Image (cartoon, grey):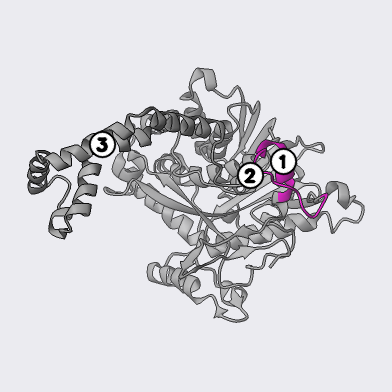
């Protein structure tokens, strides 16, 4: 409504002037002047002295100030308030995930600044580069991709494979994992904490949106590092998660997480939280509603240990398991194998009632079959833009760009069978979006998922999606 009055009020003289010029003077050299042109302003001042032009202005003002116009504007305003225009259907709104930049909470940024200021900046930069090199070595080129990543039509995945292979050959970096001591822990929070925070925030935001009734009573973060997934969970569920458990083999990382915890505001501080170095192997294991493993599986030495850890995490999962890795072919391969492993755990045990204790994928897949990209030239990955705090820019020696895109692969697995539609079609009445939200929650399990950004072409748009049939 305010825009109408701005147009017919504050901007009306210039609107009248432009309209009058176009109608009475077909002179492009005048009408194309910049808005603030001195020549145009002078011409406008001279024009207002013209009697015919002033008469036109008076007639327009009389019409705009008439009661009929005011009544019409009032009716428009009342209509807009009573009948808000809905541009998207409830299904479109439910299926859209746009969260923009991810920014760390103020208390977490301040905590990192306070902790790292006690250490030498140049040493932090050096150690951060060692961390980046280690991450590249474990998530980059894998010789096994020469065999596995082939497409029946396009052939081998040359573009991605050769890029990683070139990096390894040029830098002579062999796959290795750092042991995180005090120096590495400082470098991690200064040079990688925001980068890992963004994808975790994105995935858990989608989880909360897809399953709005889910409110975890306990969260376990495997490979917690400085507690990244714990801080995200605490933020996503509005500080209503009563119990947290962080597991990390590095004692220095756990001490760093405890330091960060001490900076939380007292009114929002997590009350029940425990940090441990190892998973306990008790006969009756304590289960957690939400189990998270973010950027950890790629650091395990081999596939056998990875499978053992996956089974242990699944056994400790009461409801949902979230796995996140780097958005590289190697990261995707880890996620794809973990997804396949979890979905097949119960099928291999004939004594288990599959209908009761099975598993299904919540996101990103709309199906529980074999991933169609496993032997494709592409890999399923996503991107989340994050805000670079000042300390991250200094650690990376970046001066101009205060943002970066963090790429990741993920899967959300839930215990039980995939929900089935009661009918083939469920109404999505735009007039009452709240009435069918529960139906949309079930329908979303069967919607196709875009796996690539849309490509806009002439008179058409190309969409790459994964369907519920697994194609």
When asked about the image quadrant of residue 240, the answer is: top right
Which quadrant of the rendered structure holds the N terminus? Answer: top left
Horizontal placement of 403 versus 17: left or right?
Answer: right
> In front here: 347 or 21?
21
Which quadrant of the rendered structure holds the C terminus? Answer: bottom right
**Marking on residue 114:** none
The answer for how far apart the CA atoms under marks 2 and 3 are is: 46 Å
Residue placed under numbered mark 3 in the picture: 59
When asked about the image quadrant of residue 467, the answer is: bottom right
Residue placed under numbered mark 1 in the picture: 436
Query: What residue is rendered at 56% in x and 39% in y?
Result: 229
The residue sitting at the right extreme is 351
Secondary structure of residue under mark 1:
helix
Pointers 1 and 2 in contact (CB under 8 A)? yes
Pointers 3 and 1 in contact (CB under 8 A)? no
> In front here: 453 or 218?
453
Residues in magenta? 422-443
Q: Nearer the viewer, mark 2 or mark 3?
A: 3
Give the mark nearer the N terminus: 2 vs 3. Answer: 3
Asked if residue 78 is positioned above or below residue 149 in the image, the reply reads: above
Residue 174 visible in the current orientation: yes
Residue 370 position, x and y percent, is: 72, 65
Residue 274 position, x and y percent, is: 62, 29
Horizontal placement of 307 versus 193: left or right?
Answer: right
Give the mark nearer the N terminus: 3 vs 1. Answer: 3
Categorize mark 2 by other alpha carbons within 10 Å: few (<14), some (14-19), many (20+): many
The answer for how far apart the CA atoms under marks 3 and 1 are is: 52 Å
Whether the magenta-drawn stretch holds residue 33 is answered as no
Residue 408 position, x and y percent, is: 53, 54
Residue placed under numbered mark 2 in the picture: 90
> In front here: 200 or 397?
200
Whether the magenta-drawn stretch holds residue 434 is answered as yes
């Amino acid at each position: 409504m305010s825009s109408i009055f701005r147009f017919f009020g504050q901007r009306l003289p210039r609107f009248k002037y432009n309209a009058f010029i176009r109608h009475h003077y077909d002179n492009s050299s005048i009408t194309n002047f910049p808005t603030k042109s001195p020549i145009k302003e002078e011409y406008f001042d001279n024009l207002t002295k013209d009697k015919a032009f002033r008469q036109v202005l008076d007639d327009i003002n009389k019409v705009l100030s008439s009661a009929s116009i005011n009544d019409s504007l009032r009716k428009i305003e009342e209509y807009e308030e009573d009948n808000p225009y809905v541009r998207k259907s409830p299904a479109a709104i439910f299926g859209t995930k746009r969260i923009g930049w991810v920014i760390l909470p103020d208390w977490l940024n301040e905590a990192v600044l306070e902790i790292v200021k006690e250490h030498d900046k140049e040493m932090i930069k050096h150690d951060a580069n060692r961390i980046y090199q280690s991450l590249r070595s474990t998530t980059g080129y894998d010789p096994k991709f020469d065999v596995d990543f082939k497409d029946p039509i396009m052939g081998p995945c040359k573009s991605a494979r050769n890029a990683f292979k070139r990096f390894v050959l040029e830098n002579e970096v062999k796959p290795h994992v750092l042991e995180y001591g005090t120096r590495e822990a400082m470098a991690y929070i200064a040079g990688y904490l925001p980068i890992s925070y963004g994808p975790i925030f994105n995935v858990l935001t989608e989880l909360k949106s897809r399953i709005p009734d889910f409110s975890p009573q306990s969260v376990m973060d495997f490979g917690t590092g400085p507690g990244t997934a714990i801080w995200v969970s605490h933020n996503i569920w509005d500080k209503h998660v009563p119990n947290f458990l962080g597991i990390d083999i590095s004692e220095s990382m756990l001490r760093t997480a405890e330091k960060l915890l001490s900076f939380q505001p007292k009114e929002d501080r997590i009350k029940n939280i425990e940090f441990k170095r190892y998973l306990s192997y008790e006969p009756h294991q304590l289960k957690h509603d939400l189990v998270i493993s973010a950027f950890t599986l790629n650091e395990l030495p081999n596939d056998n240990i990875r499978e053992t850890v996956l089974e242990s995490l699944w056994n400790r999962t009461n409801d949902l398991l979230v796995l996140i890795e780097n958005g590289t072919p190697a990261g995707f391969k880890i996620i794809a194998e973990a997804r396949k492993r979890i979905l097949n755990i119960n099928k291999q045990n004939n004594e288990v009632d599959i209908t009761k204790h099975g598993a299904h994928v919540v996101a990103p897949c709309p199906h529980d079959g074999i991933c169609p990209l496993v032997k494709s030239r592409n890999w399923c990955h996503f991107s989340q833009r994050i805000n670079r705090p000042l300390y991250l820019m200094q650690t990376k020696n970046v001066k101009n760009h205060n943002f970066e895109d963090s790429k990741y692969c993920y899967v959300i697995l839930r215990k039980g069978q995939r929900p089935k539609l009661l009918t083939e079609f469920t109404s999505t009445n735009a007039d009452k979006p709240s009435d069918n939200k529960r139906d949309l929650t079930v329908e979303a399990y069967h919607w196709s998922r875009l796996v690539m950004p849309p490509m806009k072409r002439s008179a058409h748009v190309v969409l790459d999606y994964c369907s519920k049939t697994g194609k």
